[in-house]
Image (cartoon, rainbow, N blue to C red):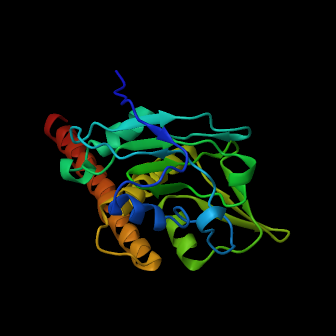
Amino acid sequence: MSRRLNLPLKGQAPAKNAAARSARRLVTMGKRMRIGSAPLRGPYLPPEEWYEPAEARCTGDYAVIVRNAGQGYRHVITEEDIRGRLAQLPEWMLAGLDVVQLSTMTRKKRRAACYGMQWGSTIYLYPIEESLVESFGKPPRPQQKIEAAMYDARWEHARGQWRLVWTEAALRDFYLNNVLIHELGHILDSRNSRYLDRERYAEWFAVEHGYKASRRADLAQKAAAKYVVRRHG
């Protein structure tokens, strides 16, 4: 059964404490903007619901809120996927997490589309095109090429247009072991205040606790399966 909390939903209510105010100021752009423009800041940030941090709750008792993906878009992971992935992490990593929201892609948000965003104690995950193909007017940066290769996506170039082509499995892997963990890293980062420093930390956190951890688990599972086959073969 899904565990959901009674969360006070507020539009732009003033933050009640320094930590919350700091968390709001640090929101610039989400996990790897899908466009090549400069990051959007302040009032230009695509609006999202603000959830007041819970004053007292059990670790891991966070809410997962699922919004309609929006026309032409779809969510590639479910609440069950999110809870299953986060359950693999130590409890202390979830202590500051109150909400994970699968958000709606609107016309306004498409101008600054991203895969995920952290705001206060909430993680917002955004949907992907139904075709699982993203189109870009500019070539990918080296880091974007590396990241795509890590998750078995591929870049295509034709007629001046760049396309990032995903499979269902690649996207699920990317969202669960990169985007979700990246944004959780932002929640846990209490030391850095500069945007670039926070991004570096979140990227490191996603690689260590998302990408590498998932690959280690896969290798261990495959090794165990081979052992069983050899033993009983």
Residue 33 lies, in percent from the top left, at 60, 65
Please report the residue visible at 51 percent of the width from the left and 48 percent of the height from the top. 125
Q: Is residue 202 above or below residue 62?
A: below
**Side (left or right) of 220 relative to 102:** left
Q: Is residue 42 above or below residue 58?
A: below
Residue farthest left in this picture:
231
Residue 180 lies, in percent from the top left, at 42, 52
Please report the residue visible at 42 percent of the width from the left and 58 percent of the height from the top. 183
Q: Is residue 33 visible in this depiction of the protein?
A: no
Q: Quadrant of the N terminus?
A: top left
Nearer-the-camera pick, 10 or 105: 10
Q: Is residue 129 above or below residue 29?
A: above
Residue farthest right in this picture:
159
Nearer-the-camera pick, 63 or 206: 63
**Side (left or right) of 209 relative to 7:** left
Q: Quadrant of residue 190?
A: bottom left
Residue 78 lies, in percent from the top left, at 47, 35
Residue 118 lies, in percent from the top left, at 45, 56
**Side (left or right) of 41 relative to 1:** right
Please report the residue visible at 68 percent of the width from the left and 72 percent of the height from the top. 36
Q: Is residue 7 visible in this depiction of the protein?
A: yes
Q: Quadrant of the C terminus?
A: top left
Nearer-the-camera pick, 22 or 207: 22
Q: Quadrant of residue 139?
A: bottom right
